[in-house]
Image (spheres, rainbow, N blue to C red):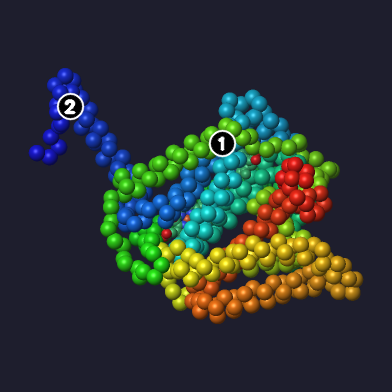
C-alpha cells in the first residue's frame, strides 16, 4: 500500500497518536512550500545542466551576494549619514558603538568586491560555453547591463565612507569625465553636483547607490531569469565536435536544482561571514580635499583604464577605447557566426588552442608594450612639433590595431578557423591585455605612478 507508515512511525504513533496529525500538517506545509518555490523555479530542468562544471554556481553566487548587499545595505542606512561633515564620523560610530556594526560593514564591503569577481567569472563562463548564441542573445545584453550595474554600485559605494581613499579615488575618476568630447564638463558637473567632489557628489552618489541602482538591479535580475526560463533553461553542455542533441532527460527541480542552489548559497554565506570576521574593510583617515595622497589611484576595478591613461591620450584612454569595447561587448551575440557552439567549452579543440595562444601572446606582449612605452615612446611623445593626440593617440592605436589584425590573419590562416573561433581568440587577447594593465596599475605603480616592484615599498597599491 502506498504511503503506509513504516514500523518506526507506527510505534511512534502508538505512543503519541497526535503526531500522526503533525505529520500530515508537515506534509501540507511541504507542499505549500514546494508550490511557492515553483512560482520562481521551473518544475523540471534538463539533467545535464545540473553539472557543476557548466555553471560553477557563479550566477547563483551573484544572486546570493546581491541579496546580502541589499540586506546589509539597508542596515547600514540606519546609521550612515550622507553629509561630508558627518559621513566619516557615522562610519566610526558604526564600527565602534553599534552592535555588529563593523561586521555588517565588513560583509557589505567584501560582498561588493566578491560580486565583481563572481559577475566577471560568470560572464566568462557564459562567453566560453557559447551561451550567448541564439536564442540567448538578449540575455547576454541584460547580463552586460547587470555587470555595469554592479560596477556602478561599487563605484558609488566607494565614496560613501568619505575617507582619503574614497575622496581621491572618486576625484580621479570624475576628473576623467572631462575628456568626453562635447558633453564632458557638463556631465562631470551633473555627476559631481558641482565643480568638484563635495556635498553635492556625496548626496548624488548616496541616492544613486541606495535607490536607483538597487531598483535597477531588482528589475533587471527577474528579467534575466525570465529569459532563461523562456529558452527552456541553460545551455546543454556537450563535448567539442558533437552536435546539439536536444534537451535530453529532465528531472524535477525540487530537490535536484534546489538542493544545489541551497548548498552554494550556504557555503558562500559561511565563507563571506568568516572572511568578514577575519578581515576589516579598509578605512583611511578622514577625507582632506587639500591633501592628495601620492599615488592617487582609482578603485581597483578601474585601474586598467587608469593604466591606459598613462599610455594613451586621455580622449582615447578614457572615451574612445572604453566606449568601443562596451559597444563590442553588447554587440557580441549579434555577430553573424558560422558555428553555433552553445554548450561547448571554448567552441572546439581548435578554439581552445587558439584561445591559449592568444592569452599567452597578450600576457607576454602587454608587459613588453608597457615597458617600451615607458622608456621609448614617451621620449617621442615629448617631441614638441607633433600634437599629443597623434603621438599618444593615433600612432599607438594604429600600431596596436595593426598588431591585432596581423595576429588575427596569421592565426586564422594557420588554423583555418571559423569566425566563431576567431572572435573568441580576439576576446581572449583583449581580455588578457586588459587584465595585465589592471594588475600593473594595482601592484606595479608607485609614487608619481612610476613603475616599481610591489615588494619595493612593502604595501601593494
Ligand atoms: C548581478 C549579476 C548577475 C546575476 C545575478 C546573474 C544570474 C544568473 C543566473 C542565476 C543564471 C543561471 C545559472 C548560471 O548560469 O550560473 C544566469 C545565466 C545567464 N547569465 Fe547571468 N547573472 C548576472 C550577470 C550576467 C552577466 C554579466 C552576463 C554576461 C554578460 C550574464 C549572462 C547570462 C546568460 C547568457 C545566461 C544564460 C546561460 C545559459 O543559458 O547557459 N549574466 N545568470
Ligand atoms: C549591488 C549592490 C551593492 C553594492 C555592489 C554596494 C557596494 C558598496 C561599497 C563598495 C561600499 C563602500 C563600503 C566601504 O568600503 O565602506 C558601500 C557602502 C554603502 N552602501 Fe552599498 N552596495 C550595494 C547595495 C547597497 C544597498 C541596496 C544599500 C542600501 C539600500 C547600500 C547602502 C550602503 C551604505 C549606507 C554604505 C555606506 C557605509 C559604508 O561605507 O560602510 N548599498 N556599498
Q: What residue is drawn where x is 90% and y is 71%?
A: 384
The quarter holding residue 242 reads: bottom left
Residue 179, how many percent across, how many down? 75, 63
Q: What residue is drawn where x is 50% and y is 62%?
A: 127
Query: Mark 1 packing: few (<14 Cα in 10 Å), some, or many (20+)?
Result: some
What whole-number distance in Å separates the C-alpha atoms at marks 2 and 1?
Answer: 43 Å
Quadrant into which the N terminus falls: top left
Check disc 1 and report its element: helix, strand or loop. helix
Q: From this view, report whether residue 280 is shown above or below residue 319.
A: above
Q: Which residue is mark 1?
A: 275
Residue 299, how many percent across, how many down? 68, 49
Q: From this view, report whether residue 348 is shown above or below residue 55.
A: below
Query: Mark 2 packing: few (<14 Cα in 10 Å), some, or many (20+)?
Result: few
Residue 2's disc number: none
Q: What residue is drawn where x is 71% and y is 35%?
A: 88
**CB within 8 Å, label 2 to label 1:** no
Q: Which residue is mark 2?
A: 8
Q: Residue furthest right?
A: 384
Residue 200 can be seen, yes or no: no
Q: Which residue is nearer to you in this view: 426 or 88?
A: 426
Q: Which residue is nearer to you in this view: 370 or 45?
A: 370
Q: State which image quarter holds ligand 2.
A: top right
Residue 284, how many percent across, how many down? 73, 37
Query: Which mark is first along the chain, 1 or 2?
Result: 2
Q: Is residue 177 left or right of residue 236?
A: right
Q: Is residue 286 left or right of residue 146?
A: right
On whether ligand 1 comes within 8 Å of the CB at mark 2, the answer is no
Q: Is residue 313 left or right of residue 434?
A: right
Q: What residue is drawn where x is 48% and y is 71%?
A: 350
Residue 339, how many percent across, how many down? 44, 74
Residue 22 can be seen, yes or no: yes
Check disc 2 and report its element: helix, strand or loop. helix
Amino acid at each position: 500500500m502506498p504511503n503506509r507508515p513504516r514500523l518506526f512511525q507506527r510505534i511512534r504513533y502508538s505512543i503519541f497518536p497526535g503526531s500522526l496529525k503533525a505529520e500530515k500538517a508537515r506534509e501540507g506545509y511541504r507542499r505549500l512550500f514546494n508550490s511557492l518555490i515553483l512560482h520562481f523555479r521551473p518544475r523540471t530542468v534538463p539533467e545535464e545542466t545540473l553539472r557543476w562544471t557548466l555553471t560553477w554556481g557563479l550566477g547563483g553566487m551573484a544572486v546570493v551576494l546581491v541579496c546580502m548587499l541589499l540586506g546589509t545595505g539597508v542596515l547600514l542606512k540606519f546609521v550612515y549619514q550622507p553629509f561630508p561633515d558627518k559621513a566619516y564620523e557615522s562610519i566610526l560610530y558604526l564600527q565602534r558603538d553599534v552592535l555588529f556594526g563593523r561586521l555588517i560593514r565588513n560583509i557589505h564591503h567584501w560582498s561588493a568586491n566578491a560580486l565583481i569577481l563572481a559577475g566577471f567569472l560568470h560572464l566568462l563562463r557564459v562567453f566560453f560555453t557559447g551561451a550567448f548564441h541564439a536564442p540567448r542573445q538578449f540575455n547576454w545584453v541584460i547580463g552586460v547591463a547587470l555587470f555595469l550595474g554592479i560596477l556602478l554600485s561599487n563605484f558609488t559605494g566607494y565614496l560613501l565612507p568619505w575617507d582619503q581613499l574614497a575622496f581621491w579615488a572618486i576625484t580621479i575618476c570624475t576628473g576623467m569625465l572631462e575628456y568626453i568630447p562635447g558633453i564632458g564638463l557638463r556631465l562631470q558637473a551633473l555627476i559631481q553636483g558641482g565643480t568638484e567632489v563635495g556635498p553635492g557628489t556625496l548626496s548624488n552618489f548616496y541616492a544613486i547607490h541606495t535607490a536607483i541602482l538597487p531598483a535597477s538591479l531588482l528589475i533587471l535580475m527577474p528579467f534575466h531569469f525570465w529569459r532563461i526560463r523562456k529558452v527552456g533553461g541553460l545551455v546543454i553542455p556537450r563535448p567539442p565536435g558533437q552536435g546539439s542533441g536536444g534537451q535530453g532527460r529532465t528531472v524535477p527541480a525540487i530537490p535536484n536544482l534546489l538542493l544545489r542552489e541551497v548548498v552554494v548559497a550556504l557555503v558562500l554565506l559561511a565563507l563571506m561571514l568568516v572572511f568578514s570576521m577575519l578581515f576589516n574593510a579598509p578605512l583611511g583617515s578622514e577625507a582632506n580635499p587639500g591633501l592628495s595622497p601620492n599615488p592617487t589611484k582609482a578603485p581597483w576595478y578601474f585601474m586598467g583604464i587608469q593604466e591606459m591613461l598613462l599610455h594613451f591620450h586621455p580622449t582615447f584612454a578614457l572615451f574612445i577605447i572604453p566606449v568601443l569595447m562596451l559597444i563590442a561587448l553588447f554587440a557580441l551575440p549579434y555577430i553573424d557566426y558560422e558555428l553555433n557552439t552553445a554548450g561547448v567549452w571554448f567552441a572546439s579543440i581548435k578554439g581552445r588552442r587558439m584561445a591559449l595562444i592568444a592569452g599567452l601572446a597578450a600576457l607576454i606582449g602587454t608587459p613588453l608594450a608597457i615597458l617600451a612605452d615607458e622608456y621609448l615612446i614617451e621620449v617621442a611623445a615629448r617631441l614638441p612639433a607633433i600634437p599629443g593626440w597623434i603621438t599618444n593617440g593615433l600612432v599607438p592605436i594604429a600600431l596596436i590595431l595593426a598588431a591585432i589584425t596581423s595576429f588575427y590573419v596569421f592565426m586564422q590562416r594557420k588554423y583555418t578557423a571559423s569566425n566563431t573561433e576567431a572572435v573568441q581568440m580576439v576576446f581572449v587577447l583583449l581580455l588578457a591585455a586588459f587584465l595585465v594593465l589592471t594588475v600593473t596599475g594595482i601592484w606595479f605603480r608607485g609614487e608619481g605612478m612610476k613603475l616599481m616592484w610591489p615588494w619595493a615599498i612593502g604595501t601593494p597599491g
